[in-house]
Amino acid sequence: MKYKTSKNSIQESFDKTLKGTNLQDIMIDLSDTTIDTLLKDELLKEIPVVKTLVAFAKLGANIHDRLFLKKIISFMNGLKDIPHTERSRMIDKIDASKEQRVKVGEKLLYIIDSCNDYENSELVSRLFKAFIQEKISYDEFLRSSNAIERITSYDLKWFLKNARKYMTVEEVGSLISSGLFDLYYEEIDVTVEDQDDHESTDKYKTRVDGGGAGVTISRIGVIILEIIGKKVL
């Protein structure tokens, strides 16, 4: 895989693109564009990271590398209205904080590469855009991106359409472990009552109510709903 063997050159060109490249001229509908068409787009090839990936593609990239190129372009497309000075300021702020062991640019490449397709990559860019605009923290960006990586596009669409503040465990099914929901348990209420029936051998009757489990939308789920889909009612 050329992404691994050429990591340094791709990383350098990706960082240069994030922090110093004007992306406002990117106007591409990726749903109707083939990878071969992207490889011939002269305007796109002016973007450092695209230029680097196109060079590798000409050397005989495999299908993974070609799809990776499309995901990178999709990610950059989502940031086109954010000036490179703003992108650079926020990235430098996180890199200089020393709280994160992995630099922002490197972490983004891992996230983009892990996306199932270019559509998920575009969603990640919307979350990253929210971070740059200081609507969410960097940690919230990482956690919400991780949630998107862990579920299928079908499950994400279901979540955006059907999520409510409180739901049952049965309703969310396998999404219980996605990070989109928090599990909670109802309080157990124990009531002890006198028996009116004198023929009963038990003087008291005990009744237990509650104790069931449910789910509520997590902070990460709320972020995804607000940035990508509907707001929680």
Image (spheres, rainbow, N blue to C red):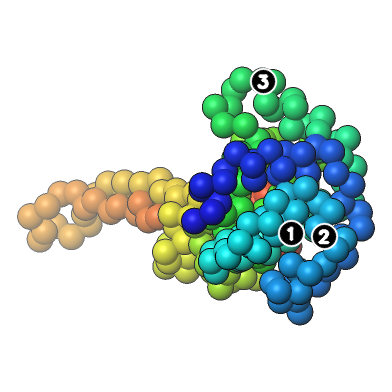
Q: How many marks?
A: 3
Which residue has dot 1 on it? 73
**x, y (%) of residue 78?**
79, 56
In contact (CB < 8 Å): disc 1 and disc 3:
no
Q: Quadrant of the C terminus?
A: bottom right
Residue nearest the viewer, comparing 168 with 146: 146
> Mark 1 is on which residue type?
Ile
Residue drawn where x is 24% and y is 51% of the image: 206
Q: What secondary structure is marked by label 3?
A: helix
Q: Nearer the viewer, mark 1 or mark 3?
A: 1
* Dot 2 alpha-carbon crowd within 10 angstroms: few under 14, some 14 to 19, many 20 or more: many
Instruction: Using the numbered discs, state the Cα–Cα distance from disc 1 to disc 2 in whole angstroms.
Output: 8 Å
**For marks 1 and 2 on the same chain, the one whose residue lies earlier in the sequence:** 2
Residue 74 located left or right of residue 178: right
| Nearer to us: label 1 or label 2 | 2
Q: Position of residue 79 (x, y in %)?
A: 81, 51
Marked residue nearer the N-terminal end (3 or 2): 2
Residue named by callout 3: 97
Res. 44 mark: 2
For disc 3, the neighbor class at 10 Å (few under 14, some 14 to 19, many from 20) is few
Residue 23's place in the image compared with 135, above or below, is below
